Amino acid sequence: MPGSQTKEMIIQRHMANELLQAPILLPVQRAQGQDLSTDQPTMQPDPAIVESAATALEQGQTHYVDVPGVAPLRKALAAYLKDMGLVGYEQANVLVTAGIQECRFLSVQMIGEVVGCVALPEVVHPGARKAAGVRQIDVRFLPVDAGNGMLPRLSGMREALESGCKLLYLESPARLTGMVFDGATVKEIAGMIEELDAVVIWDQGLAPWVHNSRYVSLGAQPGVAERVVVFGEAWPGIGLESWFVGYLAASGDWWEDMRSQKQVISICTSTPSQFAAVKAAEMYGDLHAAQLEELAQGRHKVLELIGRLNAEPLAGVSANLVALRLPDPEQAKVVLREAGFSFADGADFGAPGVLRLSVTADDAIVEALDQMA
Amino acid sequence: MTSKKRGTNLLYSLIAEARGYADAIILGRGDPDFDTPTYINNAAREAMLKHANDYTPLEGILPLRQAIAERVKRVNKIDVDPETEVVVTNGGQEALFLMVMAVIEEGDELLMPEPNYNTYIDALRFAQGVKVGVPTYVEEDFRVDPERMCQAITGRTRAMLLVSPNNPTGSVIAPDDVRELLGIAQENDLMILADEIYDLFIYDDYVHLSPASLPGGKERTLTLNALSKSYAMCGWRIGWIAGQADLIAQVKQLKAAVTGGNSIIAQYAALAALTGPQDAVNEMREAYSRRRRMVLDALDSMGISYGTPQGGQFVFADISFTGMDSVELAQRILAEQHVLVYPGGPFARRRELGDNYLRITFLQPEDRLGEGLERMKLVMDTIPATS
């Protein structure tokens, strides 16, 4: 009997879906060599975090838990958001997710379904395009400003909104460059979405790494909580990157739609990850402050070394990464790969010719730059 | 009030309501009362110390996929290449969702024996597919009749869903029927979505057969399973899909778009579960077998008929003689005796297939189960038969 034509048709259909076929960029990319591709820095979790998760298991926390997440974690995340100035989001608005990609998927698909369209930056984490491709919705692309860390321009946002595409997907810090919208721009975006009755999905997962600059979340603007869904990794950098735990915060109707869909795709987030995150919340302040300082110094050193490469660093304020435009990016990729370094390719984000390297606490990135030099 | 909610949301609101009673006995949700066996928890602790930051490929760590491939070969007689033909998922639920999304698109019809696990409807709705319910009947122990399945095929039919043992009925598709269903799928060039999450829980002399184990089966079948039920690991969220590499490659793309990966700790725990001593699984299976008998005896004493569950962890009990809607009766049992059983309504569109039933799980220790059934009987004794 010949092979299944139905199966072939199904495969061809998926292959033709350009959004779904966007590159895969995982939180931790590879096992061997030096991984300079990650969105978030990472370290071995503190023994107290391990103990907390293991103890929860031993006490029987091995069953289904509430779809939105265990209460102590939701409470801690709500407090974290309050500390960032997001006063419009309470514990009841928080949804614990099985990592950052589930945040993208739930927000893009569930809000996109209602709004009917989503406007993505031309340069964006490939996971956003993939999320939009699962069940295709109308996707527009926002032009970006190469001189401003590849962030989308206000004019492009307005144009999308005025043309009827009422859902914006924005990253601040940008996942490729670590650049943020400044306070004045954030205020303008808030005014624009109010004026044009729009909704924003706001990825603020890299916000903890902003240094020498004040981070302003769109969710912290007065009166926008009904229109802004925020998400990010839970306690990034503390060693839970491979444990897959993230958060979403949204107002009632959006939250309920996403909660309901999370139930359909994963029921709840893995319990050891959640209980580890509860403990991580208690320790985050101290551990993160030291880590941020270390990375900021590392990034400063990297920027000094970049001059040797005839490379152009893209504007960014996140201590955990540096994005470079190189005169011969293909050659640089070959050199890095041969030397055992992994990196994030800007082409995967929509910015060919750019490489993103994670800043690490050790000298791995310096070694990578030496190789390229 | 929960009565206006439907489907999965209704069931979740009943769970929330039950939590309000300190003495509640839960015979509704499919969450085993057993905690995860200690050796698995110990493996998780070790993984937290040794592998916390490990890279995890999208499809899961290779040792786990190898263990899954070995298990699928041993239990299901399906040959799969762990490198290319297995994807680890966030529990059976994500596997279910990805499987539906992989095969169904807008307007495609999926043949689903009714009653069926309610969240298939949610996944199908998301995919904008069309459910074509194929009835199964209590008088036939909810047998999936190949002839009825065949009659339901149209030009838009893309796949058939085979859940065996079935949730909520506990029916196991007989080997001859599996062969016939595969033949129908081949003749009509349909895909098969096989949900085998309860395949370790088969009772009496019934036999489970995986369609993908048959000649010509694997190329058109995606098979899902999970550790939630068999190893009491509901909270960990580890399941898998096995299938031929070409289609699995597309499942991976979907997985990358939906959740992007699985907890490294849960994966190492799953590896320990599959490769460690299986005594705990055997003990759980024996316990479920005893409890199943308890539920059937109790239903007999209440004069309630049922399809004999040949596998799984629940009984689908016929309450049509009460003349009551299943939601109304479940809420009454919960309100009066603080026993949660699931109404059958969310499991089937047609009243005679769903709303005339209650799903009763046997996922409580025997003393609790016995007490729950006694309390349920107190309510049933007050309800006169209308037919």
Image: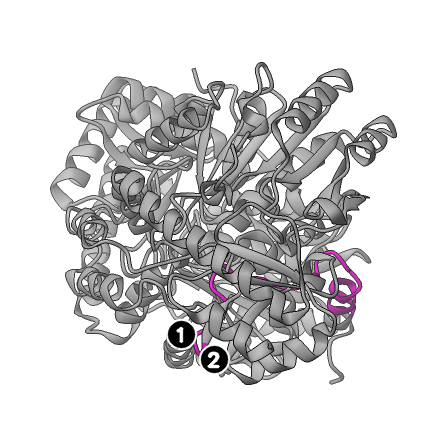
Q: Quadrant where the N terminus of chain A lies? A: bottom right
Q: Is residue A11 magenta?
A: yes
- Residue depicted at 48% across the width and 50% down the height: A319
Question: At numbered mark 1, what does the secondary structure look like: helix, strand or loop?
Answer: helix
Return the residue nearer the eye: B65 or B155: B65
Residue A42 placement (x, y as % from top left): 38, 58
Q: Residues within 10 Å of mark 1 (few under 14, many from 20)?
A: many
According to the picture, the residue beneath numbered tag 2 turns out to be: B82
Image-quadrant location for residue B379: top left
Q: Quadrant of residue A24?
A: bottom right
* Discs 2 and 1 share one subunit: yes
Up the image or down, B111 lies above or below B21; here it is below
Residue drawn 27% across and 21% down?
B20
Chain letter belonging to callout 2: B
Which amino acid, by three-letter code, is at mark 1?
Ile
Viewer can see residue B345: no
Q: Residue furthest right?
A: A163
Magenta region = A9-33
Where, by quadrant of the figure, is residue B333 drawn?
top left
Q: CA distance from mark 2 to mark 1?
A: 8 Å
In percent of width and height, residue A261 lies at 55, 39
Which numbered disc covers residue B68? 1
> Which quarter of the rendered picture does the C terminus of chain A lie within?
bottom right
> What amino acid is at disc 2?
Pro
Q: Is residue A256 above or below residue B206?
A: above
Circle 2: element type: loop
Task: Identify the residue at image location x=42%, y=72%.
Answer: B61
Q: Chain of mark 1?
A: B
Residue A197, image x, y percentages: 74, 19
Q: Are marks 2 and 1 in contact (CB under 8 Å)?
A: yes
